Image (cartoon, rainbow, N blue to C red):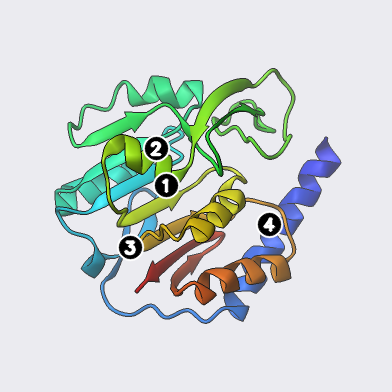
Amino acid sequence: MAATHLTRRIKLKTAEAVVPWLTRVLPGHGLERFGSTYGGWWVPTDLIGEDSVVYAAGVGEDVSFDLALIRRFGCEVWAMDPTPRSVAFAGGVTEPRWHFLPFGLWKEDAVLHFHPPADPAHVSHSATEVRGQGPGFDAQCHTLTTFMRKLGHQRVDLLKMDIEGAEEPVLDRILAEGTLPRVLCIEFDTPQSPWALRRRLRRLEDAGYVVRHAEARNYTLTHG
């Protein structure tokens, strides 16, 4: 397990160093970073307003990004995470414009098994990778369009995904359905070669997205 974890770290660090150098990044105007050092993201402020629909997939135990957007723009945020520790943490958030859903974001509506992290002290579990040892848990997951239908939304203005390796299947479904959020904030957490990640970004660019910022494995893209 230790060797596997080391290999994973090497692949992720290599992609962090190489892919931004291979990618055309067009910052534009109005980019600001919201949230903590650990949980923050760069956002184009000219594309977010009070009536924006914001989905935040992957909560962990840090909602500094979500709350910063609410304070700055007055918008509402719908956050989703099925992890038991995240569910418990969410119970202590008192902001009325922050809404928590104890479900995962996935490529289909299904019950998935989530595997524990390599470090038991960490909160994040993964439905796509076996990283640590332990029982894990099962949880209901939904597609982006299912969440939108259940919540009565016709569009998503910003989708943040920090979903521990599930981002690629979710992106495939989003591109196939053509339900394209105007802003994507994605952590690419799947261990892969720099060239594979670059191909993934190119698919998004081919669908009309522009890379606005890259910070380690966190990418901000805009559409339209």
Choose the circle earlier in sequence order: 1 or 2: 1
Residue at 71% x, 39% y: name it: 129
Mark 2 to mark 4: distance in Å?
22 Å
Residue under label 2: 62
Amino acid type, callout 4: Leu
Marks 1 and 2 in Cβ contact (< 8 Å): yes
The answer to the question of whether label 2 and label 3 lie on touching residues, with beta carbons closer than 8 A, is no
- Provide the secondary structure element on which disc 2 rests: loop
Confirm or deny contact between disc 3 and disc 4 (CB under 8 A). no
Image location (x, y in percent) of residue 132: 72, 30
Q: Which residue occupies 25% across, 48% down?
A: 68
Which amino acid type is marked by label 3?
Answer: Val
Q: Which of 84 and 121 is in front in this view?
A: 84
Residue linked to disc 3: 43
The mark nearer the N terminus, 2 or 4, is 4
Quarter of the image where one finds residue 22: bottom right
* Amino acid type of the residue that numbered disc 1 sits on in the rendered structure: Gly
- Looking at the rendered structure, the secondary structure element under dot 1 is loop
Residue under the image location 45 percent in, 61 percent down: 178
Q: In this view, does 217 lie above or below 145?
A: below
Q: Quadrant of the C terminus?
A: bottom left
Element at badge 3? strand
Q: Does residue 109 appear in the picture of this structure?
A: yes
In the displayed structure, would residue 9 be above or below residue 103?
Answer: below
Please indicate whether residue 88 sits to the left or right of residue 173 in the image.
Answer: left
Q: Name the residue under label 1.
A: 39
Instruction: Specify the label residue 12 is tagged with.
Output: 4
**What type is the residue that disc 2 sits on?**
Asp
